[in-house]
Structures are given as structure tokens and as C-alpha cells.
Image (spheres, helix red, strand yellow):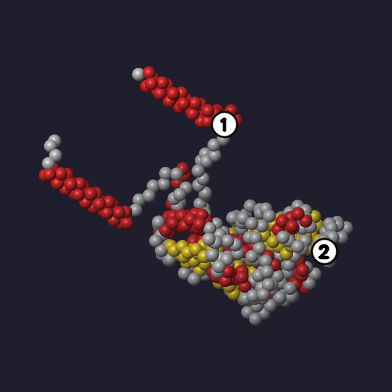
Amino acid sequence: MQVTSRSRWQIRLQNIIFFVLLTCVISALAWLSTQYYYQADWTAGKRNTLAADTRLFLQGLDEAVTITAYVPNEPELRQRISENIERYSRYKQDISLEFVDPNLEPGRAERAGVTRNGQLSISIGERSETVDDITEQTITNSLQRLSRKSERWLVFLEGHGERDPDDNSNPGLSRLQDSLVRSGFKVQKLNLIRTPVIPDNTSVLVIAGVQGSLTPGELQKIQDFVAQGGALLWLHDPAVEDSLARSDLDPLSDDLALRFISGTLVDANPEIRQVLGIKHPAVVPVVDYEEHPVTRGLKFHTLFPFAGGIDVLVNEESLWRPQPILLTLPRAWSETGGFMGEDISFSTDAGDTAGPLMLGLSLTRQREDRQQRVIVVGDSDFVANAYIGQGSNLELGLNLFNWLSQDEGLLSISPRAAPDTQLQLSKPRMIAIVAGFLLVLPLGLLIVGFTLWFKRRNQ
């Protein structure tokens, strides 16, 4: 082909047209990418895609969701959280994510109930809940709880020195109440002398650390409430064991077929106390949890200061089905002596009871078409303001109320792990692979290269 000035202009025009068309195609594809979305998950088990139940739930959730991640300036962790929340944003557009450094805004973190870095505060309307991890099971279940509009009333008994949910001091329960309210619960205090009726809409009746004496009429109201199928959370402190309140509540413990062990639980294991930073032997840790919905998901230890043990009575006529929730470590025991110094020791002669001992249990029985639930814990300090931020104390406290209020109709989403993520090789195979890549392959390349060079040189 003879190149002329005309042919040059034709080639230039063709090139211009090509680049214009290419730019138009790229621009059109860019615009289409903003209008349409397609994603494919090719991972084993579809572990980067939300479960079908979660997607269906998000489609029916008509309120906006705000998620605040209390994370320091750690780019990798923030990126991982963003990617997890982005999976939810694909199916619900009005989910917003904000990062807050709790070290720079400690007041905001405290108001949200955040006790450690990496927690998420999930909010729907005025209801909020703090969670510890970013798994689909945790986030979806939290969204389900917050989306429920039915009122759940928690009634705290008062008038006998019980712990006060409005009290901001160390013995009070104000931090617990704040977390319960953010989770959608309604909290009410009840003095049975002033108002001798337990409301019909009571989801859970709470007896938290009775110190004074109950009248026979008050005790009868509580017994009637339980007999009629009401849910009860009884937090019993051993310090009142010899007081009138203890004997007043004996009929209630008899109804539940249990008794409280004499003394105060202690754990004098110096190694464990040193690791956990516990200075007093009467602050008992629970490290391993019994299999129960209340303890499911707890990742940290819980601390129980000046707690008491619980024993189940053998009663063949009782319809209650007891199930342990919290057990002490084997080396703990119930100390009946009055001194809790460093030199305490176990003594059967003094009436001490050897561990492991039960300090929390659930009681259930079937009533017509539903299950009645009761939880008894030999301590009320663990949810007090002074200790609720320790370990998983807050999470355990919230779980107690969620379970008692029959709030377990949550999606069960199993973690989807990738198969064969680890390659196990025998020693001979590892040696063969190393020798092949480090010796055989380089030597083979050298031989081939030298052979080609030698042939070309002789041609």
C-alpha cells in the first residue's frame, strides 16, 4: 500500500474515531456500573455472603440502622469491620457505619456501654445494644432484638434494701439499667406494701440482694407470681444468710427445690488471682461455662464478689428441671469463717464446703403451651456498677434477662468455614518439594540454558 497524505489523514481519522468510541464505551460501562450491581461469591460454603434468613430479615426491617464501631486507629481492624458491615448494606441501604476512637472520646464510649476496644454499638431508633464481635450470628441477633416493638417490662422489687436500678453509686444497678433500656426493655421498681399487686405485663420479676425483712403478705405475692407461671431472677447474697430476710425467703427456695450453701465462696488459688488481677480471695472467677443459652457466646471470664453456693434439693414431686449455669473452679470452696485474709484455708471441721460449687442455675417447667423460666444466682454484686464492667459480667447480665423474657427466637446461623485451609504434609514430601524448587528446578533451567547456548555457538 502506497502511503499518501490522504491515507495518513484516513488513518488519523480512524484512530480518532476508535478512541472516541472506546471512551464512549468505557463511560457507558461506568454509568451502568452505578445503576446495576452484580456480585458472585465463589468461596466454599458461600462464606462471604449473608445467609438467606438474614437477607429475608433485612428486607422486612423498615427502620434505619446505625452502627458505631469503637475502635482505635487500627486500619486493618477498621477495614475488616467495614467489609463485614458492607455485606449488610448490600441488602439494606439505610445502614450507616461510624468509627469512634474510644481513647479520644471516652465519655461517648461509656454512654454507649462500651467496656473494651473493638465493640460495636448497634442502634435502631432509640434502642441500642453493644456487641463484642462482628460475626453474622451476633449482628443479626442484635438487630432482631432491637427491631422488636413489643414491650418487655422488668420489675425490680424494692423496700427491703435491694439494689436500686436508679442508683449511680458502686452498689447500684444504673449501668445495668442503661444497657437494658438501650436493648428495648422497660424497667420499673415495685414496693409490694405501697402497691400490693405485681403487674400482669411483668416479663421478669427481679429480686436483687434483699437485705431487710419481707412481710408474709409480700412473700405470698411473690410465691403466687411464680406459681402462676411468672419468670423470676433471684440474685441472692450470702451476707444476708443469717438475717430475717433469709428465713423469710425460705418458702420461696423450698418452692424451687433448692437451698443456699452456708458461707461465702472463696478461691485462694494465687496463680489465677495474679493472672486476673484479683486481690481478694472472695472475688470468685468463673472461667469455663456450662452449656446453656445464657452462657452461649461469652468469651471472657466473669467475676462474682462475695457470692454464695447453691444446692439442688432432691424432690421427686417437683416439676422444676434444674440446669447449672455457673460453676466455680475445683479449688474453690464455701468459707464459713468470718475472716477473708490471705491465710484462709479449707476446713471441714469448721463447716466449709468443698468445690466445685454451683453459684448459678436455671429452673424450667412446662406450663400448658409455654416454658416457665427462673434463674437463681448466689450473688448480686456481679451486675453492680462496681463490677459490671469486669470481663463478661455485663454480657452475662443481659443474657439472663433475654433468656428469662423468652427472647430466644433468634436466627441460628452457623459459621461457614472454608474446607482444607491448612495443608498437612509429611516430612518426606516437604523435603521433596523443597529439593524440587531449590535444587532440581534451578539446575534443570541451567542445563537447558547451557544446552541451547552450546548448540547456537556451534552452528
On the rendered structure, is 252 left or right of 178?
Answer: right
> Where does the image place residue 24, in percent across and percent down from the top left?
23, 52
Badge 1 or badge 2: first in the primary sequence: 2
Q: From what the image shows, is residue 133 above or below residue 252?
A: above
The N terminus lies in quadrant: top left
Q: Residues within 10 Å of mark 1 (few under 14, many from 20)?
A: few
Element under disc 2: loop
Q: Give the amino acid type for the residue marked by disc 2 in the picture.
A: Gly
On the rendered structure, is 287 left or right of 338?
Answer: left
Which residue was labeled with disc 1? 430
Q: Name the mark nearer the viewer: 1 or 2.
A: 1
The C terminus lies in quadrant: top left
Point 40% across, 57% down: residue: 91
Q: Residues within 10 Å of mark 2 (few under 14, many from 20)?
A: few
Mark 1 to mark 2 CA distance (whole Å): 58 Å
Point 14% across, 46% down: residue: 9
Element under disc 1: helix
Q: Which of the numbered marks, if any, corresponds to residue 94? A: none
> Where does the image place residue 438, in percent across and percent down from the top left?
53, 30
Number of labels in the image equals 2
Specify the quadrant of the image occupied by residue 405: bottom right
Residue found at the far right of this picture? 349
Residue found at the far top of this picture? 458
Point 27% across, 51% down: residue: 26
Q: Give the amino acid type for the residue marked by disc 1 in the picture.
A: Met
> Where does the image place residue 452, in percent across and percent down from the top left?
40, 23
Q: Which of the numbered marks, if any, corresponds to residue 341? A: 2
> Where does the image place residue 149, in percent across and percent down from the top left?
48, 68
Specify the quadrant of the image occupied by residue 159: bottom right
Specify the quadrant of the image occupied by residue 8: top left
On the rendered structure, is 101 left or right of 387?
Answer: left
Point 84% across, 60% down: residue: 343
